[in-house]
Image: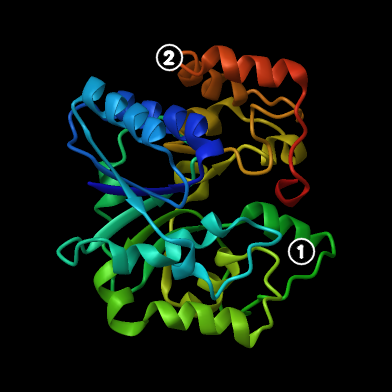
Amino acid sequence: MNICFSVNSEYLRYLYVSLTSLFLNDPGEKIHVRVFHIDLSERDRDILAGLARSFDQDIQCVHIDKEQLAGFRPEPYPLEAYLRLCMPYMLPYEVDRMLYLDADTIVEKPIGRFYATDFSDRYAVVCRDLKLIEAEENGEKHTIRDESSSYFNSGVMLCDLKKIRKDFRFEDFVRYAKDRDFDLPYADQDILNGLFAGRVIYADPDLYNYMVNMEVTCGYSEETASKAVILHYAGNCPWYKVKVTPSHKRWWYYAKQTPFYDELLEMKLKGLSLPKRLQ
């Protein structure tokens, strides 16, 4: 399996937790992880190499120069948000299938079945963004809205790289942003929704992109949460000062098995606030 992440150095500790959950829950699978980054240090890369050795897995760090992302604006999201747009063109061309995961996810069960989903001539397998759909139902307007398809969350995305490379160049993603004068509240996610509209397969979000933040607004179902394969903590990251939900315990279970546990716990106790762009 080919699984990709994009992080900056600050997010390394959270990536470590995510990878720990992935390796622990799919021990029989050979997983090739590629971490796209702009600023990981040699020490950061050594830490990830040590993690790979401890699980007999493969982690490669792929450095992207800022100049390659010069067409995008670095605010309000960091440039790393656009790294996933580079991935189809930076991965070896013999890699034709990729699962992208945000670093604020954990994997609770084997993902081979999801990874093998038939693309049926679509660009990606995704999950509807239930958080944003709920916001729209409450009157919040969004600039990227295609009535023919549901808005999807790009934090968990299984991509048909062969088809994406055939139909798009990297410059097409940049042009889409510029044509809208960067009026993209959700950055790369808006770009992907705009260009992939009507050409994606929707998977069950309760299984493959369980949005923990929804536990705050919609309540918690132990049965639903226990079936989730991938939990996503977007907007309710456990290491910040946020409303604690039952699924936070699952993230801390994996965090406790990493060398960053004490550091993460100290951050939590200090009550670091969630950045406004992630609220």
Outermost residue toward the right in this view: 139
Residue at mark 2: 257
Q: Amino acid at mark 2?
A: Gln
- Mark 1 sits on what residue? 136
- Asked whether, in this view, residue 223 is left or right of residue 219, the answer is left
Q: Is residue 261 visible?
A: yes
> Crowdedness of circle 2 by 10 Å Cα count: few (<14), some, many (20+)?
few
Q: x, y percentage for residue 24?
A: 32, 23
| Left or right placement of residue 91 versus residue 194 in this view | left
Please say if 168 is above or below 133.
Answer: below
Residue 193 in the image: x percent, y percent?
54, 71
What kind of element bears circle 1? helix
Which residue is rendered at x = 33% and y = 84% of the image?
167
Q: Nearer the viewer, mark 1 or mark 2?
A: 2
Distance of label 1 from label 2 (alpha carbons):
38 Å
Quadrant of residue 145 in the image? bottom right
Q: What's the residue at 33%, 51% (across, down)?
A: 62
Local packing at callout 1 (Cα closer than 10 Å; few below 14, some 14-19, many 20+) is few
**What number of labels is visible?**
2
In the orientation shown, which residue stands out farthest toward the bottom? 179
Task: Report which quarter residue 270 is drawn in.
Answer: top right
Q: Quadrant of residue 121?
A: bottom left
* Residue at x-position 26% and y-position 61%: 91
Between disc 1 and disc 2, whose residue precedes? 1
Front residue of 169 and 78: 78
Write the residue at 47% across / 68% down.
67
> In this rendering, would 34 be left or right of 43?
left
Callout 1 amino acid? Glu
